[in-house]
Each structure stands twice: as C-alpha cells, then as structure tokens.
Amino acid sequence: MTFTIYELAAMQPALLVMIAGLLAVGLDTFVPSKTRIAHAMLCGGGVIAAMAALGSQLYYQRTAIHAFGNMLVLDDMACFLSLAILAATGLVLISSDADTTRRNIGFGEYYGLIMIAASAMMMLVASNDFMTIFVNLEVLSLALYVLTGITRKNPRSNEASVKYLVSGAFATCFFLMGVAFLYGATGTFALSGIREALALGLDSSMARVGLGMVMVGFAFKIGAVPFHMWVPDVYEGAPTSTTAFMSVTVKAAGVGALIRVLLIAAPMRSDLWADLLWWMAVATMVVGNLMALQQTSVKRMLAFSSVAHTGYALVALATMRSTDETFVPEAAASALFYLLTYTFMTLGAFSFLIYMGHELPGKDGTSEWQDAETLSDLAGMADRRPWAAAMMGLFLLSLGGIPPTAGFLGKFYLFAGAIERGHVTIAVIGVMASLVSLYYYLRVIVWMYMKEPMIADEKPHPSVAVVIALAGLATLLIGVMPGAFIAAAEHSIAVLR
Amino acid sequence: MISYYLLFAAALFSIGAYGVLARRNVLIILMSLELMLNGVNIVFVALSLVPHGVQMAPGGHVFVLMVMAVAAAEVAVGLAIVIALFRTRQTVDINDLQMMSG
C-alpha cells in the first residue's frame, strides 16, 4: 500500500487539534505556571484552524477524501460531527478557565488532554475501518480517564476515575472480541469489506455474535442502558468542565461511529441489529428518566438525563428499518441533528453549575472550590443572577423539549420520523418519557425562581458567562432557524457511502 | 486445529472476566484485564490463519500489535490512577469506593 501526501488532508483537521494539544503540554516548560493565556491562545487557535479546515472541506472541496487504504474518510458526516465536537471543545476550553484556576489544575496537561481527546473523536467519526475505530476509541477513553481524575487530591475524582477505567477497559475487551469475531467471519476489518462479505452470505453465527459484541462496546461508551452504570458516578466525580466535555462530545463521537458501522458494514442485515437497538433505546429512555427523577444533586440529575438523551438519539437508529421491512438510512439524520442540539443545551446546563461555584472551608484552614451541585445551591438564584438563571431555564426547557428551543425541534424531528416509518410504540414511549423528564427539569427552575437563597457567597467566573451566553444563543438559534442544520444533517447521511 | 487455539483464548478471556468481576483489589483487576486482552489477541492471531477466498487475511497480526500498544498505555494510565487513589484514600479495595451512590 502506498500513500500520497494528499491523503493527509483527510486527517488535517484532527492533526491540527492534536498538534495544538501536544504543544500545549510542551508549553509548560517555557511559560510560568500561573499564566494560562499562552495555552488558551494555542488551543483556541488549534480549534479555530481545524474549524476553518473543515469549512473549506465542506464548501470548496466538497467530495469526500478517502485516505490510507480507506481507513479514514473525511466525508460530510465526519465534517458535521467534527464541527459539533470542535464547537463543544472550544466552549469547554473557555469554561475550564474557571476549573483550572480554582482547583490548581496544571494548564498544560489539562488543555493538552482535552485537545488530544477531541482530535481522537474527530478521527473516530471519520474512521472507516475497525482498526482506526479501535485506536481512536481508546485514545479518547484514555484521555478521559485521566481528565476524570485530574483533580488528584479530590477523593471523589479519584474514585470516579478508577470506576471509569475498570469498567471502560472491561467493555473494550468485549468490543475487541466482537471485532475479532467479525474478522474471523469476514476476513477483514474494513467496514466496506465486511458489507461485501455479509452480502456474499457469510453471515455465520460468528458474525452475528461479533456484531452484537461491537454494539455492546459502543453502548458502553455512549452510556446506553444496561451499560450505563458508570455514568452517574463518573459524571458526578469528575470536575464539572470535564463532565460537560465528555457528556456531549463522547456521545457525538460514539453515536457517529455507530451510525457508520451500521450503515456501511451491515445495512442490509438490519434484522440483526434493529430489534436489539429498539429495546436498548426504550430501556435507556425509561431508566434514564426514572433514575433522574430521584436525584437531589443537580449534577447527578443531569448525568441521568444525559443517559435518557442517549436513548432519544438511539430511537433514530432503532427505527431505521421501517415496519414494512424497508431500510431507510436517511433516518440517521435525525440522530445527527439531535446530537447537535444536545451539545449546546447540555454544555450550557453544566456550565451554569460551574458558574455558580462557591468556596467551602476546607480541613486545614484553606478553602476548597465547590461547584453548584445540589438544588439548595441554586435556590433563589433568579433574583441575584437573573441573566444566568434565565439561560439555565432556557437550557432546562430545551432539554425537556419545550418550543421554541433546539431541544423541541430535535425531539420533534426524531419522533415524527419514527412515526412516519411506522414505529408508533417507541415514539409514544419517547414522548411519555420526555413528559416525565419535565418534572425534574422544571423542579430546578422552581427552586431557582421561587425559593429563598441559601448560599450567599457564590463567585461567578466571567469566562463561564461567555460560554453560557454562547450556548444559549446556539440553543435559540437552532430552535428558531433549524433549516440549515437539518439540511446539513440530511445531506451528510445522504452522501454516506 | 484452530478450535484448540480458540478454546484456549476463550479460557483466558473467561478467567480474566471472572477476575474483573470477582476480585476486589484494583491491581488484580488490572491484571485480569490484561488476561482478557491477551485472550483477544490469541483469537486475532488464530483467526488470521483462516483462509478467506484465495488469499489469507494477515490484518489480524497487525491488529494484535495495536492491542498490545493500547494495553500498555492502559496499564500505565491505570497504575497512575491507582497511585492517586491510594494517596487520598489509603486503599485499593474496589468495595471501599462508595462515596457516590443513589
């Protein structure tokens, strides 16, 4: 196999992000440890450069780049999801300004790990071969294990990190076993090669078990029931900016890779996976929402709500096979659009928790930062921080699916499509589940607007306010003018080969 | 012949899975994870001997190298995390990790 230099263009956006991240690690040697401006400029520059590269790919290049023996392909879907991931990364870079300075996290390693994880996710959504899928899935997971435990003097952070590592590595083993079985049945790791082999009738029980195990691996990474056990603990224990980062980007990357595997490797055998995904989507929506109902910690409630939202996104994949047995790959577009809306509303909600952080007196006279976590931390904040509270209200209404927000359109598009393809039951379950979810989202708003404040010394961080404003703007913009975004999502699935 | 390799790999994988689920020491869990990964590696190598069509499919050997590199990185990160855990909690017992629940 020979490669031309031209093929590097397929990984150019991800490379830009990774180089910026690696330089950020090295930068620690040259700049004083208390200044963060150099790291922020470098990483922000990397994100913007990568966005520009993706933009030029979308608007000037237009045709997909297949590189390295078709292992990576930079097509419209990869660009769409990479742009969502980069937007989230950029916002997290701004908001993590608060976490790093409040908790004395080293800038180099923190920014570096975020950028490396982001670049692995960008390559994951462009991966067209199980070898690249595996390597990128692991690179992003390893970066996230460390990010979860990066406040290494905090016992909750350590505990979350160990739980994430052990359960993540365990799931990886099953994913790998699935890949091995698929390889044994078809003799190749390439997604298109697997499709050809399955079309030739090589769908032995080995291939079926392999496909099932691969889906278990993906279900774990995106936190779908019954593989969601790690989600609440890890999301609660991790520093809030890390939680915000992984709750949105890992979902975008994981669901994106799953879409590619299903649509390219096994489209004509949807009978093998559609029912499995149907049950998984229903279980994820129901369990995620019921568990979220019982939480008093807002951070943990948002963790379970992110499980529930995985379920909504899976509805699109589960209903790709319509009830009259035709296969409608275009259905995946509603999952892509939903991931985009979910990115901004969840990031905004977690950022609000960072924004409302306060200082707690520590053991030995020092003070320790505590992000807003419980309902009582947020009580009465509408009077003192009217704008931020209004934005949080917007994010929560959007998560609950109230018009005219992005979340409403995402859900509408998702469930309307499912009904169109004849899947009425799952759509009804989904609508009921989001009805239930309104209870716990509105409860936060009630606490913010109708209770007396219980905390007097919250210290809002200005840079987080920027993130909240931008995320709120995006949530409203997608809610009011969804046309261009829906068209982009539909186009990226339509040209998927 | 290949079925012997696969049986051996299945045994390794199962022993590892049992170790992850049943043992409480995080270090032993990490070792069990290595066993599982090695079981997967043997499956890859064994299955690359299966002829598909006219030619052999040597990709399995390459994949094993990837898995080895990732496993090494995972252990490096894992041990670092365990050290951080031990410094704050003075324990590596997975049953003691119950600060968060509900």
Image: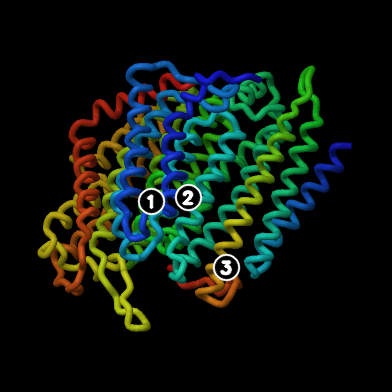
Residue occupying image coordinates x 19% and y 42%: A473
Name the one closer to the observer, B89 or A277: B89
Amino acid type assigned to the residue bearing label 1 in the image: Ser
- Of marks 2 and 1, which one's residue comes earlier in the chain? 2
How far is disc 1 from disc 3 in space, using C-alphas? 30 Å
Category of crowding for the residue at label 1, using alpha-carbon neighbours closer than 10 angstroms: few (below 14), some (14–19), many (at least 20): many
Name the one closer to the observer, A97 or A20: A20
> What residue is disc 1 on?
A306
Chain of the residue under label 2: A
Name the one closer to the observer, A41 or B7: A41
Amino acid type assigned to the residue bearing label 2 in the image: Gly
Chain of the residue under label 3: B
Q: Quadrant of residue A484 in the image?
A: top left
Q: Is residue A6 above or below residue A31?
A: above
> What residue is disc 3 on?
B83
Image depth: mark 2 or mark 3 in front: 3
Do the numbered discs 2 and 1 sit on residues whose CB atoms are within 8 Å?
A: yes
Q: Quadrant of the C terminus of chain B?
A: bottom left
Image depth: mark 1 or mark 3 in front: 3
Q: Residue furthest front?
A: A30
How far is disc 2 from disc 1 in space, using C-alphas? 8 Å
Question: Which colour assignment does the render follow?
Answer: rainbow
Q: Is residue B65 above or below residue A66?
A: below
Residue occupying image coordinates x 85% and y 37%: B2
